[in-house]
Image (spheres, rainbow, N blue to C red):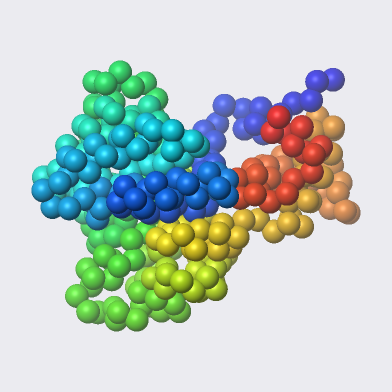
Amino acid sequence: MTAVHPNEALFGGEKSFPLIPACEHFAGSEKLILKALGLQDSIGPLFDITCDCEDGAASGQEREHAEMIVRVLNSEANKHKMAGVRIHDYTHPAWKLDIDILVAGAGKLLSYITIPKCTSLAQASEMIAYIQKTATFNGIERVIPVHLLIETHGALNQVHEIAKLPWVQVLDFGLMDFVSAHHGAIPASAMRSPGQFEHRLLSRAKVEVVSAALANGIVPAHNVTLDLKNVETTYSDASRARNEFGFMRMWSIYPTQIQAIVDAMKPNFDEVSDAANILLTAQAANWGPIQYAGELHDRATYRYFWEVLQKAKLTGVAISEESNQAFFS
């Protein structure tokens, strides 16, 4: 009997959950983007790079900045093709220009487009529609994944509707802007840990973002850690975000944060080993119910463990050669 792959046996045409790196690293200038691409090539494709138009472009230099990103992403430096871009927000006059330049010049290889500071479902819908229209105009047939920053009261109030929009792959939580929008009701200390996880307004907002994302089959991504050089702080923040709130991805704004985030987000090695053994046994049983270590497993648990195994692959956790050949070759 020919072995059936988990994607065919367990999902059968359903929309699959996005499998993307657990870390995205922000870089604004050409120098920093090139440095990030070099690091990505050095340590392997364990993280995405977000080329930043919003905070990276000097006022009046929006066109030149977007054109620089197109040039760099089309160069040999972008070996892994794992880079996206954050454009300007809806109120900025350059947001359409960003899309025009980036989609026309790099639409076939952009990993995603991040949209910041939407205040309503209508704004998010209009910006996504413009991305789709521009892609069609430029003969780009692929879906360009969209990441939406939830960092305003309006976006949080409509987050479940926003999560249903087409092409959306990720909901990002924007901590600093969200705190600022509360006019001092949330203290500045809550931009750091432990306050960012314990202040009631912030914990509520994070839970809403994660719930909306997961209910609609998209990835919830956590905000940055402000402490740039303390690796332990970054690891702790990423671990709390993953294990207490359910975030599955996190931003990095300094190179040393990348590995800490990946390490905190990756699945436990013992669970990965169990996942591989369970799936190999299930595949041999043609995906019928099995016993493993005295426990019953069926398609419900197989789905869970298949995602564990895929996340292990993405985060660099060692997987047995037998599992690699059966599921990833």
Residue 119: which quarter of the image? bottom left
Q: In the picture provided, is 255 more to the left or to the right than 16? A: left
Residue 46 in picture, x, y percent from top left: 55, 48
Q: Tell me where residue 186 appears, x and y as whole percent.
A: 29, 78
The residue sitting at 24% across, 55% down in the picture is 55
Above or below, comparing residue 212 to residue 83 in the picture: below
Identify the residue at image location x=50%, y=63%: 256
Q: In which quadrant is the N terminus drawn? A: top right
Residue 258 image point, x, y percent = 50, 58
**Is 312 placed left or right of 103 in the picture?**
right
Compared to residue 288, the image places residue 45 above or below, namely below
Camera-side residue of 311 and 68:
68
Q: Residue furthest right?
A: 294
Residue 222 visible in the displayed image = no
Residue 132: image location, x then y, percent:
28, 29
The answer to whether residue 130 is above or below residue 313 is above
Q: Quadrant of residue 284?
A: top right
Residue at image position (86%, 49%) is 292
Tell me if I can see residue 108 in this picture: yes
Task: Classify the position of the C terminus by image quarter.
Answer: top right
Q: How many marks?
A: 0
Observer-nearest residue: 308 or 86? 86
Q: Nearer the viewer, residue 81 or 100?
A: 81
Q: Residue at x 24, y 40 (%)?
A: 66
The answer to whether residue 328 is left or right of residue 213 is: right
